[in-house]
Structure formats: structure tokens, C-alpha cells
Amino acid sequence: MSTITMTPGRLLRWKPQVDGRGLLTTTVKLVALPAAGILVFLLLWSAGARNIDTSLGQFPGPLAVGEQFGALYTEHQRSREKEVAFYERQRERNARRVAEDPGYEPKIRDYTGKETFIDQIGTSLVTVMSGFLLAAMIAIPLGIAIGLSPGLNAACNPIIQVFKPVSPLAWLPLVTMVVSALYATPDPVIAKSFINSMITVTLCCLWPMVINTAVGVASIDRDLVNVSRVLRLPPLQHVRRIVLPASVPMIFTGMRLSLGVAWMVLIAAEMLAQNPGLGKFVWDEFQNGSSDSLARIMAAVIVIGFIGFLLDRSMLQLQRFFSWDKGTATH
Amino acid sequence: MKWANTIRAAVATLAFATGLGATTAQAAKLGYPEKEELTFGFIKLTDMAPIAIAYEKGFFEDEGLYVTIEAQANWKVLLDGVIDGRLDGAHMLAGQPIAATMGFGTQADIITPFSMDLNGNGITVSNEIWSQMKPNIARREDGLPEHPIKADALKPVVEKYRAAGKPFNMGMVFPVSTHNYELRYWLAAGGIHPGYYAPHKGDISGQIDAEALLSVTPPPQMPATLEAGTIYGYCVGEPWNQQAVFKDIGVPVVTDYEIWKNNPEKVFGITKGFAEKYPNTTVRITRALIRAAMWLDDNNNANRPEAVKILSQSHYVGADYDVIANSMTGTFEYEKGDKRAVPDFNVFFRYNATYPYYSDAIWYMTQMRRWGQIPEDRSDDWYKELAAKVYRPDIYEAAARSLIEEGLASADQFPDFATEDGFRDPQTHFIDGIVYNGHQPNAYIDKFPIGLKSGEKL
């Protein structure tokens, strides 16, 4: 509902600006300046790239990176073709086996080929979102509890303060060992590597959300709390009707911070732990040391940045959608 | 010969007990694989080729195996993966299954039914070291350096660095890697002490008494580490020596073919538990790998260009085609422009390259003893027992025989299984001329001027 009511309002606010000079300045601001910025960046990049000679050849300029985007896409398509052929062969083989060995129950196994760049983008996104959601499920209730109770706050504060600045990468070896000790099934449905990355992401997402939620809850307007007291709302009702709506802006600020950290950490974790995803892609290319490697890494860097940007924007949109106070959701 | 019989008897019992019934000619037809979905690990080196080829050419699928192949960050991660079951099997350093079974490093029972290749390594030094070595090297008539280059040419350089108080650092890929032993062998043959290990005193750096300090660097990072000046030279598998030439940061001085002609290199390692639990799968993996190795050496290396193309894909080795092709297609570029023919630089099948010889395992153990990784004396029988635990020609034989029966291979491509005792004839082609006889490991160790001898303990 809130978006529908919001949109006409925004349009109305827009209208008065549509006089001659206003439109021009708006266009300049929205289109021309960013375009100029990007253009200058590309020029600097290609000029700079030409002057950096690495042992793997020249540093890739925008053109070389563009080419690699094409190559990565072609590889993806080729891999899909191979996948189709793989399933085809498998069906034939299963049919032959059933003919020889009627007791055999044919089973279609997943494609065994390597993930392509595009698959790895998907893997990274799924991992970061799962880790983030898991963290949110823990952090928001915990933050509310801490915000509501000064006692609990005093009890948890030292722990939060100590663990907050720890780089999640320091956790990674511990997470890896604990996961392989506790998650020991012969035929795991979810890959261990996925769980490792996810838990590492969760550990790093946790703190900004806990802290922001707690602060948001603790700083609710006294008047609102008093209203709840006057109405004698039971505790759960109090949280639902008063606390949550009042602290939504802060909760979302925490979530946005967390997601940004999560994305950065995930790439590093994938690199270090060799878990599938964009981080592993970068590391593999670095190890390959072929003449295309740098351009491919640069392509990955651009994609990583772009996805990080999109994640941040979508959190912002969500925040706008859920907040009663639109003014708090700024970029 | 008494020993060979004992081993054969033990193996026969073992094979019977574990259900590897196919060791005898009249055995039943090979059954379906018990485990069909497998994950194999590898390190980005050209000698992982048999695994990539078995996958790409459909040899694994022919056996009903659906294999995922994953590059690993380093040898330790790879070994841990096999031990904890994340990987079903992997491209391993020959020393890894031996050291693991022995308990040097991580203790685990790892076996190998398949030896992956011969040769394939080189020793590279940085341009700076090369320019100082060059005056000490004899020239041919055409002005190019005379090969093989011995470490004698490096000795004055090391002495100069030591006199200036600068440690002479070199890289190898793993404490129990072929490369460590080859680099040590080459250095020691030239009078440079590479240092001892003393695991019983907690010293596993391998730098006691060392004149050249060796440390571990993962293969793909070798060129970058050399370029950064952290190390002055390294011993590593291909394509990382040729990479140094292409990047113009170093010069390969010697190949392992020149240090020890046709030396055994990587093996395919699985846990003993895996082989016992999935005997048919184990034989079938071995069959697929044998076929891949045959394909790689077929028709005098005719398939090599195609293999190089496969390996240069980014999810296998990923280096440039030209870099991999240099060594895989029978040439090796030393100094830039000094390209020489080394037709046997990478051998995957001929000379019985894939048969897991006990004597190959024992050679690695002699070097472990020589440099103190095995801290105290062991009897010749101890060496042989350990070799028979780790190297499993019985599984290889079962795989080879079934391939012969199905007409996919011919008997003359393999050792004569009826008489083969698992020991190669005494080998003479070492850079220092010392002869190796696998039956007498202790006597062999005593022949080296540098290194622990029988009876010695640090």
C-alpha cells in the first residue's frame, strides 16, 4: 500500500521542476555528469593500463575486459551445451544398464562440469543471502531483547564489543573445522563448502544488526512507550505495535550495513576457503596466470562491485517500503 | 626374490579378503561401481592430465562413474580433503600416501593403485642468480650452455650469498614432494647442503645445517614468489618453469629427467577405507585412468596438442596454450630462445609409467631417511612392508587384466604380471651416477656423501 500512496506524491513534487532551466539542470545532474565521470574514469583506466606491464602482460584496459565478458558468456553457453549432452549420454547409459541389470534403479545425477562465471555469480548471491537472512533471524530478536532490557544490554555488551571488530576471516578456520566435525553425513544434501561460507557471512553480519536494532529499540520516544503503558499492552503486543514500527529505520540501517559487509567478506572467504563463488573465480584465475587472467579478474571485480551496489540499492528500497519515516532512508 | 613372493602372497590374501577377486585370470566379470558420484581433487599442474582426459574423453563415464574434478589450493588442503572424505581421490605427490601411512605429518592410510606419470619437473633460478651461475657453466660449440647443469655451478653463488650474510632461499612445493627430494638431490650432488629434518625433536622446517634454505610455496604461486625476490629459485612441475621463461623472470637450469631419467612423479591417491568399501569403483577408476594415460601417449604423443588444449581451459591448469604446449609436446625452453628437444619430458604411459612399483615407493622413503624425515634406522624389510601397504599393484593388475579381456588394451602394453615382482631393475641414470637398487634401501643411503647414513640420528 505504502508505495502506491507514495508514488503520486513523488510525481507531484517533481512537477514544479519541469520548467526550462530546471529540466536542463536535472538532466545535467542525472545523466551528463555521471556519464562524464564514467568516461573520464575509462580514459584514465585505459591510459594507465597501457603503462603498467605485469609479468602476465599489459594490465587489461576496458576493451580487453569487455572482450573477456564476451568470452565468459560464450564459455557459459558452451558449458550449457555440454550439460545437455551429459544428460543425454546419461539417459542412454541408464537405459543400457537397465537392459542388462533389471534390478537397477536408474538415477539422474547432476551435471559434473565446472560452474561457469555466471553460475558462480548465482552461487555467491545465494550464499550471501542465506548467511544474511540467518544473521537477521538471530540478530533482530536479540537486538530487540537487548534494547528493551538494560540488564541484558549490560550483560551482552562486553561480548559484542569484543567480537564485533574480529575479522570474520579469522573465524574461517574454526568454522571449517567445526562444520566438518558436526556436519558429517555420507551424502550431504547441502555442500559443506556452502555451509562454511554461509556461517562465516552470518558471523560478520550479526554485529551491526544487533547493535543498530538495540540502539533503535532503546531510543524509542518516551511518549510511545507511555502510550503502550496507558493501553496496558501485553509484552508481545508492545513489541509488535510499538517497538518494531518505531525502530524499523534503525533496524534497516543495521541490515544495510550488514549486507555490505557480508558481500565483501563473502568474496574473501570464498577466496581463502576455496568455496565455489566469485571469490574462487578470482583466485583460480590468479593461479592460472594465463595472459587473459588479469582481464578476467577485472571483469569479476566490476561484477562484484555492481552486485554490491545493487544489493545496497535493494536494501534501500526495502527500507523505504517498510519505514513510516521516509526521511531516514537516504543513500 | 624371497621378498617378492612374500609380498605377492600377502597381496593375494588381501585381495581375497577385500573382494578384489579379479586379480586372478579366471575371476568373475567386473561388477558395477558401488559409488557412482565421485569428486577428485587436483593441483594446477600439467601432470593432472590423466584425470582431465579421463573426464573429457568419457573414460570415467564409460565405467559408469560421474566424476566432478576440483582444483585444490595446495597439497595440504588436497590431502586433508581425501582424508576427511570431501574428495574421493586425488592427484597426489608420490610422497604423500607414503608419509601419511607412515605418520609423518597427518596420519592416515592412503593407498595408490595408479602412478600418474614420469618426469615433468624442473628447477628454475631467478635471472639474477642465472647471470652469476653462467660463468661457471661449460659451453657447447654453438655457445649455448652444456646440459645437464650441475649444482656445482650454483655452489659459488650460494657461498657468496652466505658470506654476505644473506640466506639463500629456495622454494619447493611440499615437505614430502618429489620436488623437495629432487631439489635436495640436485643441490647435494653439487655439494650444497639442503638441510635436515628432525621430526622427533619437533623440527619440521628441514633447515638444520642447511646452506640453501628450502621452504614451501604452492606451485601456481612459484613464479610470483620468485619475481617478488622472496626465493632465488624453485623446483616445481610444469607449466610453472616454462611460465618463468615466458614472463622473463627466471631460467630453468635442469629438468628432473636429467637428475634421474624417468623418475616416478605423481600418483592417484585414495584412502584404504575407500578401496575396501568400494572395490569395483576402485578398479573402475584405475581402468579409466589407464585408458587416459594410454590416450595421452598414443601414437607417439599424437594426441598431446588436443590434451594441451583441454588443459589450458581455465578450470583445469588454465595457463596459456603455448606455455603448457612447450613441455607437453616434447620440447623444453631453458634460457629464452634455448629450446631443446626433451621427448620424454612428460611420460604418461610408456616405460610402464602407470604401474605402481614398490621400488619407486622405496626410493622416496630412502630420501625421507636421508634428510631425516624418517629420524632413525629402519630395516630393509620395514621399507618393503610399508611400500606394499601403500602401493597396490594388485588393483592395477585387476584393472589392466579386465581391459585386456575386453580388448581395450593388449597384454604387451603392461608389465608381465605373472613374473613382475614390483621392483624395477637397478637404476643407473642419476645425475651423480649413484645406482639405486630398491631391494637394498639401507645400502643405497650409505652411498651419498651428503645426507644421513644408516646408524646416524640427529
Image: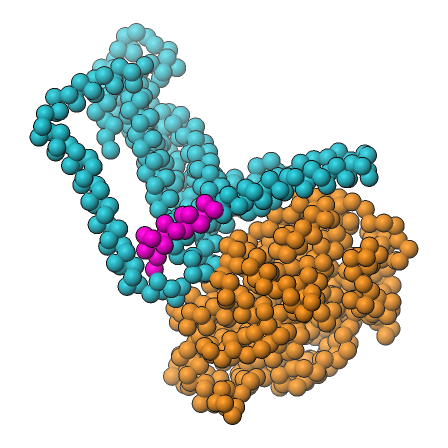
Q: Which chain is orange?
A: B
Q: Position of residue B146 (x, y in %)?
A: 53, 87
Q: Position of residue A46 (x, y in %)?
A: 28, 56
Residue located at (32% from left, 38% from top): A309
- The one nearer the camera, B66 or A143, is B66
Residue located at (13% from left, 24% from top): A18
Answer above or below: position of A302 versus B114.
Answer: above
Lateral position of residue B391 relative to residue A194, left or right? right
Answer above or below: position of B438 versus A119.
Answer: below
Q: Is residue A55 visible to the viewer in this orientation of the structure?
A: yes
Q: Position of residue B278 (x, y in %)?
A: 75, 48
- The one nearer the camera, B201 or A309, is A309
Q: Position of residue A295 (x, y in %)?
A: 39, 54
Answer above or below: position of A49 versus A223.
Answer: below
Colour of chain A in the rendered structure image: cyan
Instruction: Quadrant for the C terminus of chain B, please.
Output: bottom right
The part of the chain drawn in magenta is A59-74
Q: Quadrant of residue A326?
A: top left
